[in-house]
Image: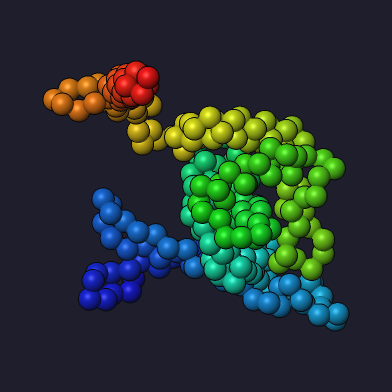
Amino acid sequence: MVGNHRGEVELSLCVEEAAIILTHGEEECKMTMKVSLTSPVMRDPGADADASRDPPDVLDKEKCLAALAALRHAKWFQAKAAVLPSCVVVIRVLRDLCDRIPTWAPLKGWPMELICERVISSAAQPLSPGDALRRIFEAVAGGLLLPGGPGIYDPCEREDTDVLDMASPQQKEEITASAQHALRLIVFRQVHKVLNMEPLYSQQRHFKRFNNRKRRREMNESGQEGSDGKKDKKEGEAESSEGAASGEGGAAK
């Protein structure tokens, strides 16, 4: 137990996860933080390294390598995705999509961040969040994930690694079909169904408002002339001018 001015923090070792678990607060509002332990030596042990010479309490190598990979991903995100317009906003929207729809679950996390950064950075100009989201759905619906496609290669690995290898061909086809359906909804102005939210406006209300404006233009009330009044006025002026011309012709005779 470690004490501070805000209370006590409980520390516990989790050797299986190669981490230290910090717990603070009561049962109603308990906060837990996981501190992973790793070392670059786990990735580059050297040519003369011998696993048999490791101490018996050495941390799990796979957990340490996963922590190193997470650290590389965080540095890459700060350098590439965080400075890209609309990228962070779209990543948050698609994280929620991966949590709500099981079909998109294989792309949650690092694969989705890579897809968003690659697709948005390939645009010729900065995109708004709506245009960026639509562009990502267009890329996935066009077969980005399908076999034979370009794939998404991991920039944080030395070897050529496709981050989409963890998904099966069936899962990739289902994600592609779901992206095509979402793209159709966006085209027909139903993006609120993709985002699982209420529509921002009612189309029926907008239609009634438009009809009211059209009626006001056609009405002729309180001395205001509508289109019919202007037409009758022009016809009256034409008749009076014709009558005046005929009168002038008779006087000349």
Report x, y in % for residue 119.
Answer: 66, 54
Relative to 211, residue 175 above or below: below
Rendered-image quadrant of the C terminus: top left
Residue at 79% x, 72% y: name it.
Answer: 52
Residue at the extreme front: 253
- Res 103 → quadrant: top right
Residue at 82% x, 64% y: name it.
Answer: 159
Q: Is residue 231 left or right of residue 74?
A: left
Query: Which is more toward the observer, 40 or 160?
Result: 160
Rendered-image quadrant of the N terminus: bottom left
Query: Which is more toward the observer, 231 or 219?
Result: 231
Asked whether residue 198 is in view, the answer is no
Residue at the extreme left: 222
Residue at 15% x, 26% y: name it.
Answer: 223
Q: How is the image coloured?
A: rainbow
Residue at 26% x, 56% y: name it.
Answer: 26
Q: Is residue 251 left or right of residue 94?
A: left
Please tell me how many numbered marks the rendered image carries. 0
Report x, y in % for residue 81.
Answer: 58, 64
Relative to 31, residue 97 above or below: above
Report x, y in % for residue 160.
Answer: 82, 61
Query: Which is more toward the observer, 27 or 118?
Result: 118
Report x, y in % for residue 19.
Answer: 53, 66
- Res 157 → quadrant: bottom right
Asked whether residue 143 is in view, the answer is yes
Relative to 51, residue 223 above or below: above
Q: Is residue 115 left or right of residue 215?
A: right
